[in-house]
Amino acid sequence: MLLLQQETVDILQASGVGTIGLGIYLSQLPPTPVNAISVSIQGGDAAVCPHQYNVQVLCRGPEYLYTAQRAELVHSLLDNRWHNTVNTVGRFSADHPVGPMYRDDNNLFVFTLNYTFITAVSTA
């Protein structure tokens, strides 16, 4: 699960969205900087569905348009993307269009992007 989280961050870093620790964070949005993206992963429970993970990306910023555009960029990078590395093979599928949006305790815009990541299963 942590490997998929890091690989998701790697996709965003490679596309110039930000750098881990400087704009992109694992699991939770930190109090600062204002413009930030977080990536968290849940799922993969062997008893329930070992090949399905929930990926959540939060995009935060002070201006609606800028934050919405960053969320759209992240969405375009991940939605319907086949991810194939030595460690992980599977596909991101968006649960909904960009949004919903809310304001955090500091009145900053936060867009929520939710994906289902289903790993490829070999029958061989």
Image (cartoon, grey):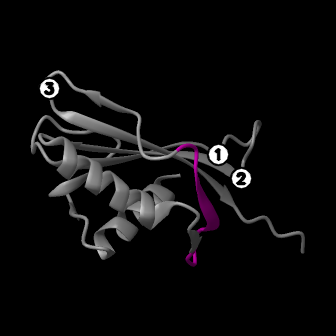
For the residues bearing labels 2 and 1, Cβ distance under 8 angstroms = yes
Q: Is residue 34 above or below residue 100?
A: below
**Stretch in magenta:** 84-96
Please give the name of the residue rendered at 20% of the width and 41% of the height, measured from the top-left corner.
64
Q: Amino acid at mark 1?
A: Gly
Q: Is residue 105 above or below residue 18?
A: above
- In the image, taking residue 17 as reference, residue 108 lies left or right, namely left
Q: Nearer the viewer, residue 106 or 29?
A: 106
* Tag nearer the camera, 2 or 3: 3
- What percent of the width, then of the height, locates residue 52? 67, 49
Upstream in sequence: badge 1 or badge 3? 1
- What percent of the width, then of the height, locates residue 53? 60, 47
Q: Is residue 51 above or below residue 96?
A: below
Q: Is residue 92 magenta?
A: yes
Q: Is residue 123 above or below residue 118?
A: below
Please give the name of the residue rendered at 71% of the width and 52% of the height, measured from the top-left corner.
51
Residue assigned mark 3:
107
Residue 11 location, quadrant: bottom left
Q: Nearer the viewer, residue 77 or 38?
A: 77
Rounded to the nearest angstrom, the CA distance separating label 2 from label 3 is 37 Å
Secondary structure type for disc 1: loop
Residue assigned mark 1:
44
Q: Would you call the spot at circle 1 few (<14 residues within 10 Å), some (14-19), or many (20 or more)?
A: some
- In the image, taking residue 75 as reference, residue 79 lies left or right, namely right
Q: Is residue 90 magenta?
A: yes
